Image (cartoon, helix red, strand yellow):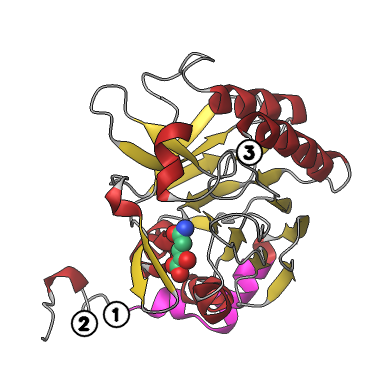
Amino acid sequence: MAKLLKQPVRLALVQLACTADKAHNLSHARAKVLEAVNEHKARIVVLPECFNSPYGTKYFGSYAETLLPSPPTAEQSPSFHALSKLAAEAQVYLVGGSIPEKHPTSKDLYNTCLTFSPTGELIATHRKVHLFDIDIPGKIKFKESEVLSPGNDITMVDLPEYGKIGIAICYDIRFPELATIAARKGAFLLLYPGAFNMTTGPAHWELLARSRAVDNQAYVGLCSPARDMSADYHAWGHSMIVDPNAESLGHLDEKEGIVIAELSGDRIEEVRKGIPVYSQRRFDVYADVSKVGPTS
Ligand SMILES: NC(=O)CCC(=O)C(=O)O
């Protein structure tokens, strides 16, 4: 059987200190991505959710860029062009966190991740499928759906030298179906640019990263912005890389930094051989979860 991950690859997650200044965020992202590549020899680099803007419903509209028709002009999307140029300059696969996107005609807004190849070509676009709408009294209320529309696709991208990766955004990680489908379609790595907060971060960030890894026996990477206590939204940080056995390969605290790990196809095979849940699934018993109605 062909290896899921054809050769070892170094993954870097850049936990960026993001500000309200888009131009600064773009040039700072460039410096950190070049650091990940030149100093840490990363071949796949990931940026955080909303890396070019503050995270908050009141900001999405004013920071949004038009990505369609693709490629957009530099005026329509400075972030598209900065990321494309940077991927080509660094000759790296660049998973560009996410940016607020404005649809050119409907004016709908999306939370969108753009991924570029080492030649600067756009190779994947993921619009956040599950919008972050929660209300935990006395702790946090957030409603992305007040201003954002959801995407409707599972996003996978094939990196010819390495294999396939699945890409989703933050709250998407709580819905294991996306990860399961990506893994069953052959993803060796599930990546989530994300920005959890001071309530759900300590409770669930690591748990979810390790759960998606152990469910799917694949590598998982969660990339957050650094925490800024002067911003409206206090990101949890703690970007981390988890191996297919749900063991942490590295994580940060709340400050800016880069977490790096080498991923290997042998490790995936070893884990799947030891605990072969991957090939023991009983789809004859639980064929279609969507047909099971709620019980109350
Ligand atoms: N940006 C997000 O989607 C936040 C998700 C989050 O904090 C969660 O608990 O889920």
Q: Is residue 178 above or below residue 43?
A: below
Query: What percent of the width, then of the height, locates residue 190?
Result: 52, 58
The region drawn magenta spans 267-282
For mark 1, what is the residue?
282
Q: Residues within 10 Å of mark 1 (few under 14, many from 20)?
A: few
Please name the predominant secondary structure of the magenta segment in the image.
helix
**Residue 125 picture quarter:** top left
Identify the residue at image location x=41%, y=45%: 58
Q: Amino acid at mark 1?
A: Arg
Measuring from the top left, give residue 177's x and y in whole percent.
34, 66
Residue at 83 percent across and 42 percent down: it is 35
Which secondary structure, mark 2? Answer: loop
Residue 162 x, y percent position in the rendering: 63, 46
Q: Mark 3 — residue?
A: 94
| Cβ atoms at labels 1 and 3 below 8 Å apart | no
Magenta segment includes 277: yes
Label 2 sits on residue: 285
Q: Nearer the viewer, mark 2 or mark 3?
A: 3
Q: Are marks 1 and 2 in contact (CB under 8 Å)?
A: yes
Report if residue 288 is visible in the image.
Answer: no
Report, in whole angstroms, how far the alpha carbon at label 1 lies from the one at label 3.
36 Å
Disc 1 to disc 2, C-alpha distance: 5 Å
The answer to which of 135 and 1 lies nearer the viewer is 135
Q: Nearer the viewer, residue 100 or 114?
A: 100
* Residue at position x 75%, y 25% in the image: 89
Residue 141 is a magenta residue: no
